[in-house]
Each structure stands twice: as structure tokens, then as C-alpha cells.
Amino acid sequence: MHYVKRAISHSVKGVKFDPAMFVRCWPTADTSPVRPPHLGERTMSAPRPDTPEVSASVLTQALAQFNTTFGAYTADHAGLDLPIGVLHLRMRLLREEFAELMEALDGTDVAHIAKEAADLAYVLQGTCDALGIDLDRAIAEVHVSNMSKVGADGRVTRDAGGKILKGPGYFEPDMTPALRGH
């Protein structure tokens, strides 16, 4: 049986990485991906009651400290009902950090690229906090969905540019668990 697995079990500055975030998905003969038992049946109309636990990443913990220290806007429920100035700030910061990363990628300094990538991730996490989105949970849901791109024969299909294409068993991620207050 073909499956994709990534097992990481190290700690970063005292924060234990949870390898359960990386789950196995494998195709069956009928081309439907089999979801690991802890994920439950796939439904798009209702959230899964047994969504796997996702530990807070170093990024999430760092932004929680930043938001508390600096009084940054955070939402306790998902939505776009945040103050318009906060939304405009988040959009401006994302544009700036993305542009800085793109500029760094044109250079040769990998340390500078790493710094700009981290800055973009930091601002993206702050934006998700302001929108009431649990980014760790969203990433876990997208990962499960992405793993369903593997074909029934265990092969991965790519387009001419190298992008991995959706296989016949692909399913959309369920973002409901990532939305605070839903």
C-alpha cells in the first residue's frame, strides 16, 4: 500500500512539534482517499466532531505574545467585521512583506530570504489572528486535502511547470474547524 508520511519529532526552543499534524492519506482501489480513522468521515455540510488536535506552532505562540505585548487587534470569532483600519493595515503589511520576499528571492543571500520569509509568515499569522482564523488548524486541513491529490495508483501527476495536480480522489479542505467561534 502506497502512502505518504512525514514524521518529525523534534523540539524548537522548548516547543514540541506535533507530528500528528502530518497525517497519512492513501488511495484505495475505488480511487477515494481513505481518511485516517481519527479524521472521521468527510462531510462538507458539517464540521467533523473528531478533528485531530493540532498543537500551537512556534509562530502562533510568538504572535500571541506579540499581540498581547503590543495590544494588536485579535478576533475571538472569524469574520470580516473588524475595524476597516485594521483590515487596511493587514493588507498593507502583507503587500510590503511579500514584495520584500520577492526582492530577496532575486538576490543570492539565503539568510536574507529566510528573514523575509519569516517576516511574511509573521504578518500572515497576525492577519489570521485579526480575522479569527486558526492558521495552524487551517494548515492541517489543507495538508489533509493536499495529500488526497495522490492518484489511486499511488502516482503524482504534475503539469509542465511541476505543479502537482489534483487526482480523482481529491477533496476540498474543510475550513470550518479553523474558523474561531464556528
Image (spheres, rainbow, N blue to C red):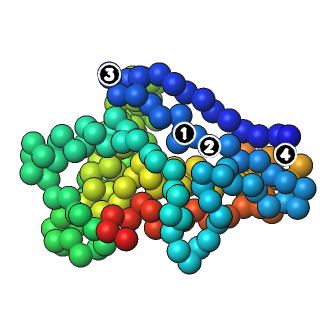
**Which image quadrant is residue 14 in?**
top left
Label 4 element class: loop
- Disc 3 to disc 1, how far (Cα)? 19 Å
Look at 51% across and 25% down and name the residue there: 9
Label 2 element class: loop
Q: Provide the residue designation for mark 1.
A: 20
Vertical position of residue 108 compared to residue 139: above or below:
above
Look at 9% across and 51% down and name the residue there: 71
Tell which of 7 and 38 is nearer to you. 38
Q: Are marks 2 and 1 in contact (CB under 8 Å)?
A: yes
Q: Provide the residue designation for mark 3.
A: 13
Q: Provide the residue designation for mark 2.
A: 23
- Disc 2 to disc 3, how far (Cα)? 24 Å
The 10 Å Cα crowd at callout 3, few under 14, some 14 to 19, many 20 or more, is: few
Amino acid carrying label 4: it is Gly
Q: Are marks 4 and 1 in contact (CB under 8 Å)?
A: no
Amino acid carrying label 1: it is Ala
Q: Provide the residue designation for mark 4.
A: 154
Look at 28% across and 68% down and name the residue there: 77
Please state if 88 lies on the left or on the right of 12 as rendered.
left
If you read the primary sequence from the N terminus, does the residue marked by circle 3 or circle 1 appear first?
Answer: 3
If you read the primary sequence from the N terminus, does the residue marked by circle 2 or circle 3 appear first?
Answer: 3
- Disc 4 to disc 1, how far (Cα)? 22 Å
